[in-house]
Amino acid sequence: MFNDTSSFNEQTVSMSHFREWANSAASSYLGGGDEPTVFLCKVAQQESLVPHQIHTLAAEINKTLHQQKYASAENKYHAADFPLADAIKAVNSLQADGGEVKLAMEFIDPKFDDPMPDPHAMFGVKPEGEMDKTASVRHELKVTMEKTANLKERLGDAMRMGEMEADALELQFIKTARQHVLSNSMCADDRMQRLGELDHFFKESGLSKRAGKPLAKLAYVLGREGLLEKNAASKAFDYWIDKKADQEAPEEWISPLLKAKVVNGQNPLYITLKTFDDKCNSRNLYKDRYQLVDDRLKIMSQKVRAL
């Protein structure tokens, strides 16, 4: 590429060209093709790009790769896990000729049909004046990353504690519901009716979604213990686990003998389920915050690698 002076005649290149090449580079790498730096060298050689154009293309490739991986990755932890397009390595590789490095000639100012982005600004790093502040910015980012990592660790601890507390509260609710089902019930049909009462009770209380899985577990255990007919226990389990808006309740619950229960805020069933629901909501909030901090940490890591 850089073997003679004619190769330094700079062509006019627009940002639309850089974006098109960057998308091709990302598609190639994510599809199992060339690594970003290899692709960068190929395009630079084919299009007779000069060094500053190679740097611009490298920045665009890295930005596009990160955007595509972050959008598609189920686990955002891996969104920043890819090799960067290395402009310096590409320029050195293309300039080298039998061990002798060819020096670039003076270049005329490039002409773009739209503004060329600042590679530093694309990654949130802006130099001050004409001095290179990369080391300072890297240090500041690392300090911020350490603080963010500490926050992530605390949120992770809170999330795990929330999980354990929610599990314990779910078990307490199941025990309370079990006592209600078995209390003064003489046969399996009576117990099935009691489950129907619970379903109605929690619908009226607005907590039926949270009650579904624990009650399904209770129905399964009662069926295994022989306290419910196997077929009836299976119907109740399926109803609560695969519940849909238009799904009908088991026919055993549709009976004029099924007594509607008035929701009472002092009822142990309501108290234990409401406590479980509150803890699950708190745990989910910690999960959301943890994910946001984790994503932020990966983005900062990406910025450090780009410096």
Image: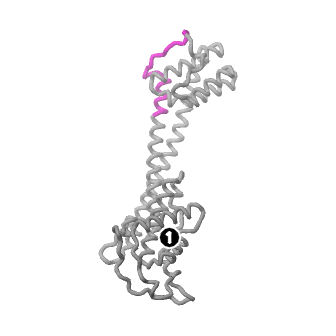
Relative height, residue 45 to residue 143 (above, below)? below
Q: Residue at x 55, y 35 (%)?
A: 168
Q: Amino acid at mark 1?
A: Ala
Q: Within the magenta stretch, is there residue 169?
A: no
Residue named by callout 1: 85
Residue 292 image point, x, y percent: 44, 51
Mark 1 lies on a secondary structure that is loop
Of residue 243 and residue 2, the one placed in the foreground of this image is 2
Circle 1 Cα neighbour tier, 10 Å, few/some/many (<14 / 14–19 / ≥20): many
Residue 273 image point, x, y percent: 49, 29
Instruction: Give the quadrant of residue 30.
Output: bottom right
Instruction: Give the quadrant of residue 241.
Output: top right
Q: Residue at x 45, y 75 (%)?
A: 54
Q: What is the magenta range? A: 256-277
Residue 81 image point, x, y percent: 53, 62
Q: In the drawing, does residue 137 fall left or right of residue 176?
A: left
Q: Within the magenta stretch, is there residue 257?
A: yes
